Image (spheres, coloured by chain):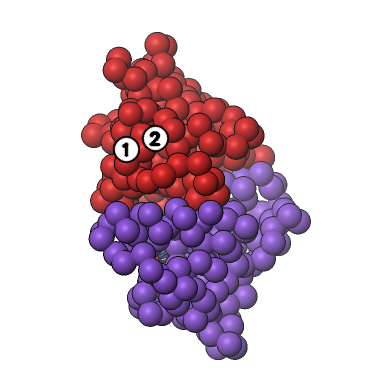
Chain colours: A red, B purple
Amino acid sequence: RILHFIHLNLHQSGHSAIGILDMSIDALNLGTRENIATITEETPIIDALNLFAKKRISALPIVDKDGVVIDIYAKYDVINLARERTYTNLSIPVKTALSYRSSDFEGVQTCRLTDTLGEIINKIIRANVHRLIIVDGARRLQGILSLSDILSMLVR
Amino acid sequence: RILHFIHLNLHQSGHSAIGILDMSIDALNLGTRENIATITEETPIIDALNLFAKKRISALPIVDKDGVVIDIYAKYDVINLARERTYTNLSIPVKTALSYRSSDFEGVQTCRLTDTLGEIINKIIRANVHRLIIVDGARRLQGILSLSDILSMLVR
Ligand SMILES: Nc1ncnc2c1ncn2[C@@H]1O[C@H](COP(=O)(O)O)[C@@H](O)[C@H]1O
Ligand SMILES: Nc1ncnc2c1ncn2[C@@H]1O[C@H](COP(=O)(O)O)[C@@H](O)[C@H]1O
């Protein structure tokens, strides 16, 4: 049924519908691959807030010193943080803030450049997330693919 | 506990913490009040997608001919739409697309210009939404107050 949706849409918007869901996001050049804003576990919360505000993005991959993606900090986590009383100020590191994240957090959702658009859409729906972090085989950050990128493709 | 969070943050960012949570969003001049992008129930889905992409916003209030807010169409609804097989193309009106929305949708979350920041934050957390639609006593559209607006206040 997703196939049906995208087929029709891509057709409408002038793309050839044939096979596009079977194309990799790499081939489709989908998502942001350069100048990805990231943070580490040690980044103060206030710096993450500033990145959200200035870059107008809704999530920041958390990477280790080797560029391996270990978690994600999303704009929405900030308001969740407000539920907790166990921190003191915005200079605390992201790590401390996330230690209070509710236990139903399923972990950061990733994808590969070789994944097809069809696989990506299924994953976004299943995980109920706004974006997937694109990683390589060693889980190093390659980019971000957000709902915004898929929408842009549909309307261009 | 939210009081605690905001108190500290506003203090840190140079605001006086005293009473700010008891101030109305009107007094705080919080949220977007002008040039609100809206749609009607008859707006074709493709037009809504174009507004998301061009204006870089994540939701559109659905208003009737008197400017009364009757629903909301969010960027996320587009991927949910893909779950359904009952529509045919992107020229269908928003109304038809939303008729397939899952039954756990709680309705559009609104607030008033006279609501205090404290009330707003509680409502956003309770409803687990990204923004509230600001309405007047007759439920006519007055503006939008999003998580982005609260974050901007914290960092400025
Ligand atoms: N942390 C990030 N760094 C750079 N670009 C991003 C980041 N997060 C999202 N984007 C891109 O910014 C646009 C808006 O994404 P979003 O905020 O998720 O709607 C999309 O083109 C994303 O690929
Ligand atoms: N439909 C809309 N029309 C105009 N401004 C909006 C709309 N939705 C959100 N905004 C504003 O755009 C900014 C980003 O909001 P958001 O996309 O919800 O993160 C915030 O300043 C909102 O107040």
For image coordinates 26% across by 51% down, the residue present is: A54
Circles 2, 1 touching at the beta carbon (< 8 Å): yes
- Under tag 2, what secondary structure? helix
Image quadrant where one finds the C terminus of chain B: bottom left
Say above or below: A54 vs B70.
above
At label 2, the amino acid type is Val
Q: Identify which residue is drawn at 40% across, 11% down.
A: A138
Q: Earlier in the sequence, mark 2 or mark 1?
A: 1
Say which residue label 1 marks.
Answer: A44
Going 29% across and 17% down the picture, which residue do you hit?
A65
Marker count (numbered): 2
Residue closer to the observer: B62 or A72: A72
Percent across and percent down for residue A71 are: 45, 27
Q: Secondary structure at mark 1?
A: loop
How far apart marks 2 and 1 lie (CA) works out to 6 Å
Q: Which quadrant holds residue B123?
A: bottom right
**Furthest-top residue in view?**
A138
Q: Nearer the viewer, residue A132 or B19?
A: B19
Task: Mark 1: give few (<14), some (14-19) or many (20+) Cα within 10 Å.
Answer: some
Q: Is mark 2 within 8 Å of ligand 1?
A: no
What's under tag 1, amino acid-wise? Pro
Q: Chain letter for mark 2, please.
A: A
Please state the horizontal and vertical placement of residue A112, each as a whole percent of the image.
Answer: 44, 21
Q: Which mark is residue A137?
A: none
Query: In the rendered view, does A28 fall on the left or right side of B111?
Result: left
Question: What residue sits right under mark 2 in the picture?
Answer: A94
Percent coordinates x, y for residue B151 in the rendering: 37, 56
